[in-house]
Image: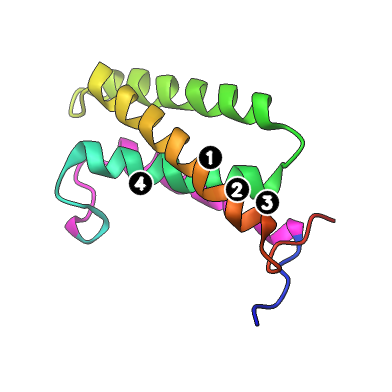
Amino acid sequence: MLPRIPRTLWILAFFTCLVSVMILALMKNPSALLSTGWDKGNHVIAFLVLTCLGRLSFPAQRGLLLLGLLGYGVLIENLQRLTGYRFGEYQDFAADVVGIVLGYLLAIPLMRSRAYEQS
């Protein structure tokens, strides 16, 4: 049986992931060890994890979380355009949206599991 994980740990994981995704998105040469080998796949996985952690961290803030993650995706693409060595693409944002949907769906059974502690 899995131990209950306090909400504060989910919040810590969410913000750690949020910062890590931004750093990786703006790095000139992110490590191949942290890549699926397909840029769109990287976006899907990053936003799947962010959304899932966000839902577990802030269960009552669904709408705000989803809008915030969409805005975060737009921010990343715009910042990448400013770097001169990365490119902001609409297809990347579409991959972010796919990750958000998948993460939202994955969070549903996790929130029902005994490992999730809402308080």
13 falls in the magenta region: yes
Residue 18 appears in view: no
Question: Which numbered mark, 3 or 4, is in the foreground of this view?
Answer: 4
- The residue under label 3 is 11
Please give the name of the residue rendered at 60% of the width and 57% of the height, measured from the top-left corner.
110
Residue 45, numbered label = 4
User: Mark 3: which secondary structure?
Assistant: helix
- The residue under label 2 is 108
Image coordinates of residue 74 in percent, x first then y, are 41, 19
Q: Which residues are magenta?
A: 7-32
Question: Which numbered mark, 3 or 2, is in the foreground of this view?
Answer: 2
- Type of amino acid under label 2: Ile
Image coordinates of residue 84 in percent, x first then y, are 20, 22
Q: Earlier in the sequence, mark 3 or mark 4?
A: 3
- Type of amino acid under label 1: Tyr
- The residue under label 1 is 104
Query: Quadrant of the image for the N terminus?
Result: bottom right
3 falls in the magenta region: no
Q: Is residue 15 left or right of residue 90?
A: right
Image coordinates of residue 80 in percent, x first then y, are 30, 25
Residue 85, numbered label = none
Q: Please, is residue 66 above or below residue 2 in the view?
A: above
Q: Is residue 112 left or right of residue 79?
A: right
Please give the name of the residue rendered at 68% of the width and 57% of the height, measured from the top-left corner.
112
Q: Earlier in the sequence, mark 4 or mark 2?
A: 4
- Type of amino acid under label 3: Ile
- The crowding category of the residue bearing disc 4, from other C-alpha atoms within 10 Å (few below 14, some 14 to 19, many at least 20), is many
Mark 1 and mark 4: span between their CA atoms?
12 Å
